[in-house]
Structure formats: C-alpha cells, structure tokens
Amino acid sequence: MKRTFLRLGVLSSVVAALLLSGMIFAPPRASERPRYGGVLRVEMRERVNSMDPRGWNPDSVDAGASERLLELAFERLVRMNDAGQPQAGLAVSWQHDASFTRWQFQIRGGVKFHDGTNLSSDVVVAALLAEDAARWNASAAGAVVVFEFKTPRPDLLAELAKGRSFIFRAAQETVVGTGPFRITDWQAQKRLELKANEDDWAGRPFVDRIEIALGVSSQQQVLDLELGKVDVIELPPNLTRRASQISGVRVSASAPSELWALVISPRGAAAYDPKFTQALSLAIDRAAIVNVLLQRQGEPAGSLLPQWLSGYAFLFPAEVNLVDAKRIRAEYPASPLQALVYDGADPSAALIAQRIAVNARDAGINLSVSTETAAGGPNGGDVRLVRWRIAAPDAREALTELMQRLNGAQAEAAFMPLDIPEQRYAAERAVLDRGRIVPVAFAPEIYAVGPAVKDWMPPRRGGWRLEGVWLEQTPSASGGGTGNGNNER
Amino acid sequence: MKRWTLSEIWARTPRVVLASFLILFLSILMAGRCWGDEVATNSARILAANLAQGLDHRKKVFVEVLDLTREMPVADIDDAKQMIEAQFRGHGFHVSEDSSYDLKVRFTLSRDNARWLWIADYENEGTHAVLMEPFERLSLDAESWLSRAHLDRELVFTGNSPILDFACTGPQQSKECGQVLVLYSDRVMLMSSEKNYPHASIGEDNPPSRDLRGKLRLSGSEFEARIQDMNCPGNLEIVGMTRCSATGGVWRFSGADGVTASTLITANQNWFTWQNSRRPTGAAVKRDGFYSIAGLTVNGEPAWISSGTDGNARIVSNKSSEILGTASGWGSELATVKTNCGNGWQILATRQRDRTEPDAITVYEWNGTEFRALTDPLEMDGSVVVLWSNEDGGPARAVVRNLKTGNYEAYLLKVGCSQ
C-alpha cells in the first residue's frame, strides 16, 4: 500500500511540475480587461454600394450588411437593447403627452460630428427631415427636438431606433456621423477603412482601426482566416464546421434572426387556396432542411417569429405530415402552384428551394424551380422563397415589420393589436391561416472570429458591436495601449 | 508539517465526505424557493383561474405542465402543477390523474426576449384555444455559500445596470451588509428603501471610456466616489447633494500600514500609471502601466501588487520601489485581503479570460520567493468586471457580469482558513 502511495506521489509531482512549467513558460496572454490598439480586419460577402445613410434601403437584399457598416459611423437618437427596451443614444431623455402625439427629446450635449462640428437639435431635425419629411414632423427648440403628429405614435422610440433614422450632417459632398468610428477610406463594393473616433461620447473604441474588405467569397474568407489574414468573417452554414476546426477560431451565432419562408406571389395569388398552401406546408421536411442544408444552424419555423422572440412559437407545428399533405392535395384536380423562384445570388437559397420542391413532389405537388432572374423577376413564379431579416429586437415591432412586408391582402392584419403576446399569437395565426406565407426555417447570423479578437459580444439578434471588441497583441506591442496607433500590428 | 498516514486518511475521509454532503444538502435546503419562483407559481394560478372560468366544469380535466425555459427547478414545476390543479378543483372540475379525461390542458412555461410567459392551450370541440399570462421574474438571489477552498463569496445584490463599485455601510465582517452605496456610470445611489433610494447624478460630464473605472471609498458617513478623472465626495445622510469635480486623473490607493500609492488613470482609457516614478534617491524608475493595484506586507514591510498591462503581476516594495516578484498567467483584476491565515495577506486574482467566458478567482500568497495558490479557482457565473480591495484589508468587492442572465452581481469575497 505504501508503494502505491509512493507511486501516486511521484506521479502527482510530475503532473504538478508539468503544470508549473506550463505556467512559467507559457507565453503571456492578454488579460481580461480590454486593451487599446490594433487593427481589426473584417471580410464580408456582400458588396455594399453606399455609406450614405440617405441612400440606404432597409428592404434591399444587402440591407443587413449595409446597416452593420453604417452603424459604425452613424448613430440614432435611441437604440434598443437585447430585451427590446429603449436606451439613450444621441437623445438622453424623452417624454410624450398622454395621447402620444407630442414627443420631446433632449439631445445629448458635447457630442461632435466627425468633422468637429457640434451635434445640435437643428442638425437632428435636418437629418430626419432629409430622411422623410412627411414621416417626421420635427422642430428644434433649444437642445430639444419636438415631434408633433396628428395621430398617436406610441411606437416612436422603436421607429427612431431602426431603419433610416440615422443622424448625420451633410456638408457639400460629404456626410458625416457621430458614431464610434470615422470613415477614412471608402471604395464602393470593395473596401471600407475606419479609424477610432477619439471624441466618441461613449468612449473611444478599443481598436485603432478597422479594415473591411467587401465582396469576398465565403470560401476565400475561410481561407484568409486560416492564414491569419483576417480577424472576423461571415459564415454560411455549410462552412461553419470547417471554420470551427481552425485553431483558436471561435464560431459565433446570433439567435435566429432570419426567416426563410415561401410567399405566394401575386401571380400565384390569383389561384391560391389557403387549404392548398397548407398541403404544401405539411409536405416540407423542415427538420431536414435545418439539419442538413443549414448544418443545424437554425431551427424549423412554423411561425413568423422565432421562439426566443415570441415565446409562443412552439404552438405552431413545424413537423412534416405527408399523409395529411397528400390527403389535402388529392382534393384538387390540378396544382394551382407550379413555379418556385429564389434569389440566384444566394447559394443557400438554391439548395433550400430544390429541397422544398422534392418535398412537394412527395405530396403530389410539382413545382418547377428557377432563379428570380430566369423567371423574369421576384414575382415571376407562383411561389417565392424569401430570406427576411428580423431586425427589430422587440416581438411587437418585428411582427409589425413582417406583416408590412407581406402587405397586399394581408394589410388588414397590420391593424390588429399586437401589444401583448396573446394578441401577437392571434395575429400570427390569422396571417398563417390565410395561406399567403409558409414559414420554413429560422437561421442565425454566423461569424468566425480569430484568436486575437476579444470580447466578441454581438447583439443577440445579430449585427456587430465592433466598438466593444479589443485585440490581443503580441507582448512586444503591449504596454497599456496608447490609442494613437503605436500598437498596431 | 504533519504527514498523514494512509490509515489516518482513511479514518478521516468518510467524515470529510459526510461533511461535504451535509454542506451541499444544507445549501440546497437554504436556497429553498426564491421569490422569483413564487411569482411564476402565482402567475400560473392566475392563468388557471382565468381558464377555469371559461370552461364547462363538468368536464374531467387532465393538466400537463412543461418548462421550455429549463430554468425552473423540477420541484417548483410540480408545485405549479398542484396549484393549477387546485384552481380547477376549486372551480368544481374533476381533475384526472391518468389518461381518462375529457379535456387535456397544457400549461407551458416559456419566455420571449423580455419576459416569462405561462401559456395554456387545449383542444376543445375542434378548436385550439390559447391563453397567456406574461410575468416578470426577478433573477435568482443565491444564498452565500462556503467554498471548499475557503474563499467565501456573499452575494450582496444584483442589478441590470453596470456597477462600477459598491460599499456596505454595515460592519463588513458580519453577514449584514447594511445599506449599500452603489456607484454606477451615471450616478451614485444609496440602496435604502426607507429613504427612497437617494441618489446623485454624476451626469453627462463623465469622461468617456468604453471601460469605465470607478471606485468608492467609505469612511464613517463620508464617502468618495471616483470615476475616471472625476472625484465626487459626499455624505450618506445627504447623498443627493453629492457633487463632482475633475482631479487631473490622480487616484490614491490605500495600502498596508497606512501607506498610499499615488497613481494616474490614463485619459479616456482603463489603466493606470504610477504618479511618482522615482526612487527615494531620485533615480527614475521604469514602471509599466497596470489595471489593478492592492496593498499588502512582505516581511513586515508595506508593498504593492499590481496587474500590469503586459499580462504580468508584480510585487513592488513601497520603500525601495524594487520589484520583489512577478507572476504571469493571472487576469487583470486583483485584490488583497488581510486575514489570520498564512503570512497574513492573501491575494485574490482573476484568470485570463475575456468577457465572453466565465471567470474564476484564485487565492494566492507570496512567501517571499514565489506565489503559491492557496485555493482552487472559485468559478464565477460570468466575467469579473470589478475587483477592489477594502481599505482596511477586509472582504474584497467583486462585480460579476452573469453570462446567463446579463445581470451584474455584487459580491463580498472573504478568505477563511482552518489552520
């Protein structure tokens, strides 16, 4: 017995010595408190056309990508946290009357635009009126911006926290913002370079500069990450596994923030029958689409809003039911839906559209699949596969946006009350029962970040927070950081 | 040092194991049901009552309760089920325990991005009906617990705003913290319900930093709230009268035996340098920047330990400014606690993790030649964003950002020993 203990003692000494030597000889790593300095290198697949908030279209295909870029340089009066609660942005406080027709916003003092001019209520009003004069009846009074509306606007805070409501200052050819980074080089569709805003009211960002390359293919992005040429990349689901196998790389996925769905197009609507749409919905094997095509990065969708946002999505079944699908299909002599179109620029869309067509065929519904371009536009088919971003962090706002995108025959649903979960559930049920949309899957935004990137904590609903990111640097470059570019790698 | 024989270890092990189990069992019992779970159960009762009123009470009902959040203890889910069944019985329903029922009602505990929800749904005569009851649920306030390794953390309070520092107004060695003075990025507030939470706005003139440093110093009823390069002296009796002024970035830390360290916080950033970087002889001393500093004694002489921005911790003599020892592999936060254990001063240090990962705190001791870990790392539920020493060597103050809830949790950290 004593010998056993002796062996154990020797063994533990060896282990302890190994551990100790590891502690002593391990290269110094960054500590957990953020450090200043360095250049963050980012690559994106999208080719963003403009860094002018006036030209930004929230409904465009690359709306998400361009908003992520714009938010680096421009800010809004209000912002929403992950729980959908309004937080002070360029406005520090606000109040409204009992009828929500008159609102007052106190503008934050001491804020400077990137050209050095001061933020004022006049500039705020000018920016909002330039965005949409009919939408914002705003006027300046001292350090206060006053909004007056003829009809109640209880959701004004949410409206000001999203979309094109960026505050900017336009001078001659240039447009400047107050955001955490200032634009130093912009080449449309190719490259964006930004520098930390030393005067940012919320504090100077930790990194000195950001370099963003646009229009880089997903494969190339992963390769560049492998070679250490880039710090942050976007990932399509099919490359998630490969990226996660790169040493030191972390893959980060947001909560599901995109809805893949089939929308009956105006062409298909002429002959559509909600019951037939139900057959199509029952035929889709959503679990297979999520597990195989989306590489388990997402969840099957039976509803418009994902579970994390609504809390009630589980009440909408998303399971395949081929028996019922066939039974309903058999009630119709011919399929009123024949052509399915998708966005040809999106590689995931082609795979999902083809898989849906296979599922539909199993239920006796023959759908021809083609790109929107080949079909003569988004409305060239009977059914269109869409990939809609759920941008709002609040269930009410998100549902309102989705219902507005459906519009047309669904317009009446937009007037349904959506204040409490029960009302939102009822509205979703009504929209889905009308058979104009078939939810397919919810997908997250996925990023891969290199080993030097620290405090990568994007909003739960997707997007970036590059102002909070810092970089681990080599010991020779350390020393507290200076914020003047001396620590750049 | 005593060497244990095998028979002694065997003889003692069962008692140690039994004691551990006993502590674990008592902890579970002490935790009991928290206030938040009572809110959940009460909301289930309200929903059940609303539902029962709208149904035909002659029906035989079966109740199923599910928890999609997976955050409610199983025992509490069982309690909720009993509460719901009691509501139905109270309305004259016969509640079935098996599969012989006319109506199956499913109660699901769910949550959206902001609140919790009880959702009741059932199929009745061909229609699917749904009722919901949203509710707010406070975060769990864990009881204090004693770690195996004698590093005791005591939760003082939690909140959803970033906390820069806090101070107990009661005697800190006791379990009662008394009223708590809290320093936020924009205000200093006394958590005193009797006085309706008096507070003073520190205002928009805050020097900006993405990683604000703030510290409270309490002496009797007087306090100093320091944020970056501003100092805000005040009094607990008139917290609302607190006013701030710029200090040029000087921070003074109290150390052992009444010595102080004068440091400068770097403008708009999160690290410090020594204000006086000269030896008593007048020779300049090169000293790196640091994130944290705490006092202690080495061989009876006052000294300082700091966590350098280069990732190394250093012990420095207060008298000679000589570096007495260095450590690598620690995190950026450290504090010291004066105890009756070992050489009398213990060092609490975080580990090297960024804020996306849970942190841990380890107790170390400097024995004159090397740092020795006295405890296993005490795992926290998130990142330690604040760790300050007490002026008199008492319990250290830590703020943890809980990765699961997003809340900020204020802890007192006490080192105990059983020599």
Image (cartoon, rainbow, N blue to C red):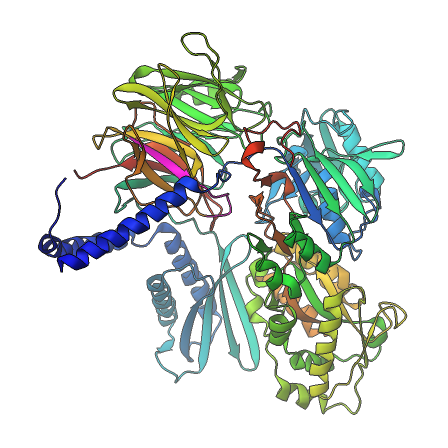
Percent position of residue B68, x then y: 47, 65
Based on the displayed image, in which of its 4 quarters is residue A236 positioned?
bottom right
Judged left or right of residue A157, residue B256 is: left
Query: Which region shows up in magenta?
Result: B346-357
Percent position of residue A336, x then y: 80, 83
Percent position of residue A478, x then y: 55, 32
Please say if A276 is above or below B411: below
Please say if B4 is above or below A355: above
Q: Residue at x 76, y 71 (%)?
A: A350
Percent position of residue A397, x then y: 67, 54
Judged left or right of residue A414, residue A458 is: left
Any magenta on residue B355? yes
Tell which residue pokes out farthest to the top in this image.
Answer: B281
Q: Residue at x 63, y 39 (%)?
A: A467
Based on the displayed image, in which of its 4 quarters is residue A349 positioned?
bottom right
Please say if B143 is above or below A475: below
Residues A210 and B84: in front is A210
Judged left or right of residue B82, residue A399 is: right
Quarter of the image with the C terminus of chain A in it: top right
